[in-house]
Amino acid sequence: VQLVESGGGLVQTGGSLTLSCAVSGLSFSTYAIGWFRQSPGKEREFVAAIIWNSGTTYYADSVKDRFTISRDNAKNTTSLQMNSLKPEDTAVYYCTSSNRWGQIALRAEEWDSWGRGTQVTVSS
């Protein structure tokens, strides 16, 4: 699976941004697509995930009710709509895929393929 992120940028506190992830090479073994983020000096942390077939979504508590993950099966894309952005949301955001059926892993090590990331900066 190959993943390419786009849509990052600079936004003010309280603003919105939408990230997109183009997914290619999907197979019947692909279970979920997720978003993680990483800021300097911190570990890569789970943000959100969507089960590719069912559309069921999962969110980290820190972004729940502010971020929305969705997918377009026809276009093989995943989007992350981010609202009410805060300076602490500043990070490089990564798109990732998982073949681990039946579970949404919170640890980055348990996800399989990764994009190169896109920078999101929220100014205060």
Image (tube, rainbow, N blue to C red):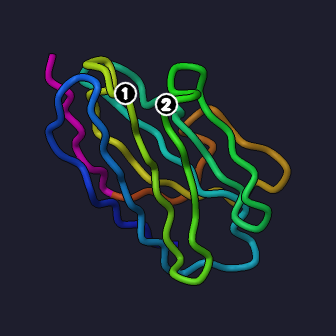
Magenta extent: 116-124
Q: Which residue is mark 1?
A: 84
Answer left or right for 85 relative to 79.
left
Residue 49 spot, x, y in % from top left = 61, 46
Q: Nearer the viewer, residue 73 or 102?
A: 73
Q: Earlier in the sequence, mark 2 or mark 1?
A: 2
Answer left or right for 2 relative to 88.
right
Q: Residues within 10 Å of mark 2 (few under 14, many from 20)?
A: some
Q: CA distance from mark 2 to mark 1?
A: 6 Å
Q: Name the quarter where the C terminus is drawn.
A: top left
Q: At numbered mark 1, what does the secondary structure look like: helix, strand or loop?
A: loop
Residue 66 spot, x, y in % from top left = 49, 30
Farthest residue toward the right? 102
Q: Write down the quadrant of residue 98 in the picture.
A: bottom right
Q: Which residue is mark 2?
A: 66
Residue 104 spot, x, y in % from top left = 72, 42
| Residue 60 falls inside the magenta stretch | no
| Residue at the image point whose x is 60% and y is 21% from the top | 61
| Residue at the image point whose x is 43% and y is 31% from the top | 44
Q: At numbered mark 2, what does the secondary structure look like: helix, strand or loop?
A: loop
Answer left or right for 8 relative to 59.
left
Q: Amino acid at mark 2?
A: Arg
Q: Write down the quadrant of residue 2 in the picture.
A: bottom left
| Residue 118 falls inside the magenta stretch | yes
| Residue at the image point whose x is 63% and y is 32% from the top | 106
Answer left or right for 44 relative to 12.
right
Up the image or down, 78 lies above or below 50; here it is: below
Up the image or down, 8 lies above or below 52; here it is: above
